[in-house]
Image (cartoon, helix red, strand yellow):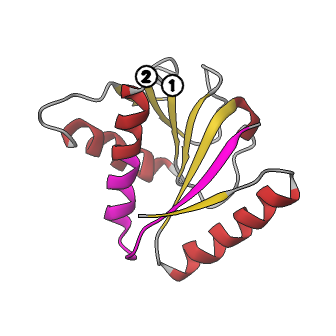
Amino acid sequence: MTRIEFYVLPDSSAAGRARAACQLASKGWQHGLAVFIRCQDAAQCAELDALLWRFRAERFIPHDLYEHDPQAPVVIGQEQPPATGQGLLINLAQSLSPHTDDFSRVIEIVNQQPELLNACRENFRLYRQRGYDPKRVEL
């Protein structure tokens, strides 16, 4: 069954959430996992694409937008299904992915912004309703 984790950040910074997504994507890729970063909208996709280009000066994180290369080691998209199964989904959208079962692991990144907190609490509840056992990880 898919492993679900909610990584909880101590602040309400959107930039901190994006940096955490890049850091997790880098770790996932280094451990041989296909990584899919699911964004809320096209603007967030473009932001993550730009951030991944400059995230680690000493190490490039191979990535691309889904529409350009769905087979990239780190894919940035929205509602698309993963081209490679059993990888890592980093969910930055406020809803559950319709493709949760296609991943071996899902990470939801939560910060202290009230609207996002409420959406993530609802996602936590929905995962439980669907038979998953989500875990909370304090960062």
**Residue pictured at 75% horizontal, 54% vertical:** 133
Q: Residue furthest left?
A: 58
Q: Is residue 121 left or right of residue 92?
A: right
Given the image, on which type of amino acid does mark 2 rest? Pro
Q: Is residue 62 left or right of residue 67?
A: left
Q: Is residue 52 left or right of residue 138?
A: left
**Does the stretch in magenta take in 9?**
yes
Dot 2 surroundings within 10 Å: few (below 14), some, or many (20 or more)? many
**Residue pictured at 34% horizontal, 49% vertical:** 47
Whichever of callouts 1 and 2 sits on the residue coming sooner in the sequence is: 1
Residues in magenta, as a range: 2-22
Pick the residue in front: 66 or 113.
113
Disc 1 secondary structure class = loop
Disc 2 secondary structure class = loop
Q: Position of residue 118 (x, y in %)?
A: 64, 77
Q: Are marks 1 and 2 in contact (CB under 8 Å)?
A: yes
Pick the residue in front: 26 or 137.
137
Dot 1 surroundings within 10 Å: few (below 14), some, or many (20 or more)? many
**Residue pictured at 40% horizontal, 44% vertical:** 24
Q: Quadrant of the N terminus?
A: top right
Q: Which of the numbered marks, if any, corresponds to residue 94?
A: none
Q: Which residue is mark 1?
A: 34
Given the image, on which type of amino acid does mark 1 rest? Ala
Q: Residue furthest bottom?
A: 114
Q: Which residue is mark 2?
A: 73
**Residue pictured at 65% horizontal, 22% vertical:** 85
Pick the residue in front: 69 or 110.
110
* Up-down relation of residue 44 to residue 87 (above or below): below
Q: Position of residue 2 (x, y in %)?
A: 71, 39
